[in-house]
Image: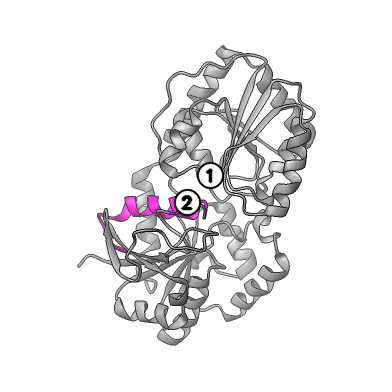
Amino acid sequence: MTPSLLIFIDHFRPGYRFGGPIPAVENLISLLRDQYDLFVVTRDRDAGDTVAYPGLAAENWLHRDGYQVLYLPPDQVTFCRVGQLLSERPEALVYTNSLFSVFTRLLLLNSLLLKRPITVAPRGELLPGAIRLKAWKKQPYVQLLRWLMTDRLRWHATSIHEKEEIQYWLGVGADQIVLAPDLPIRLSPRPPHYKQAKQLRLIWLARIARNKGLLFLLDCLERVPEGVTLTIYGPVVDERYWQACLQRICASRHRIVYRGDVVPTAVRDTLVPYDFLVMPTSGENFGHGIAEALSVGLPVLISDQTPWQRLYEQRAGWNLPLHTDRWVDVLTSCLDMGPIAYTERAIGARAVLDRIFDQSAALAQYQQLFSPVSAPL
């Protein structure tokens, strides 16, 4: 009999404002749909929206390509409804995304009553750059989980660093954590791109939030010679932070424009005209936008707080510490860069994903992740 996997995620397609967990689960489905019966439970609206997706039959299982999805309105995201879903599929393995999700809290409560094993994917929420944000609220909750932890919980880490943070914050033994990498979206490569010296076209493609580092980038750009264009794409999730950014933008010597959101189907064409993707994030569990840029052959200029390391050695960009002087130096070098040096980096960017990711190895790791919890890890 084909095993079943019941996946809970706060927001899913057609939404996109929830960030990395959506493509992470989408890519997981693509990997596993031939081996598992997949069921996704999510909300009936995108992150930040007050109205449901148009034209969807909420509260009914809808068939998609290789899986089924159930969209729940806010009044159905309850302890009883989650318990009902678990009872309807007693044989299914349960997988929840985000440690702080309402779904996760409801699943943990149900687990205490139903004795149901659960696999939890924190999605980078325990990494230093994430746990520090609103720490007054997050850390007591994490400590409570640590005290109430049971052997029925398994943890999904997507990197060695995340595994270490799960062990540190939750006191979990290594045998309760399975390491399985996030999977990148591979976009089709762009045509050969000409980069003119003394001109630099940067693209920001990320949520506008404190941990992504837009304000840091704007401050760095004020020390870079003229000739830079920065185009910002992404939803504003921290309005106060965005207002501080706008003050820098209005006073800048460079051409900086905000273009709003990008729907997933338009990402590839949006990336094509630019020289570098830039994101001085304080921490990424994976960075799907980074992977998308590399896949089209767009070099990246990012912080060293992501899994994407040794980019300079691979001639695919830079991963830099968050030191202003270092960023100013590299941004100035990118501004001065001519077409020959740039073409080497565009070729290097495209090669990174092929060098790092092995789909057959990833499948074996996810099969281990979703093996019966009673079996040895």
User: 303 or 84, which lies in front?
Assistant: 84
User: 187 or 202, which lies in front?
Assistant: 202
Magenta run includes residue 61: no
Upstream in sequence: badge 1 or badge 2: 2
From the viewer's perspective, is residue 76 above or below residue 195?
Answer: below
Residue 101 visible within the image = yes
Identified by mark 1, the residue type is Asp
Left or right relative to 242: residue 269: left
Q: Give percent across and percent down for residue 39.
A: 32, 65
| Between marks 1 and 2 in the image, the one whose residue lies nearer the viewer | 1
Quarter of the figure that contains the C terminus: bottom left
Residue at 66% across, 68% down: 138
Which SS class for mark 2? loop
From the viewer's perspective, is residue 27 above or below residue 131?
Answer: above
Quickly name the residue at label 2. 16
What segment is highlighted magenta in the picture? Answer: 15-39
Residue at 58% across, 63% down: 166
Residue 184 visible within the image = no
Which SS class for mark 1? loop
The answer to whether the residues at label 1 and label 2 have Cβ atoms under 8 Å apart is: yes
From the viewer's perspective, is residue 251 above or below residue 76?
Answer: above
Q: Give percent across and percent down for residue 260.
A: 56, 42
Q: Give percent across and percent down for residue 1.
A: 19, 68
Q: Residue furthest bottom?
A: 113
Number of numbered discs visible in the structure rendering: 2
Left or right relative to 184: residue 231: right
Residue 131, by quadrant, is: bottom right
Identified by mark 2, the residue type is Tyr
Quickly name the residue at label 1. 261
| Mark 1 crowd level (few <14, some 14–19, many ≥20, 10 Å Cα) | some
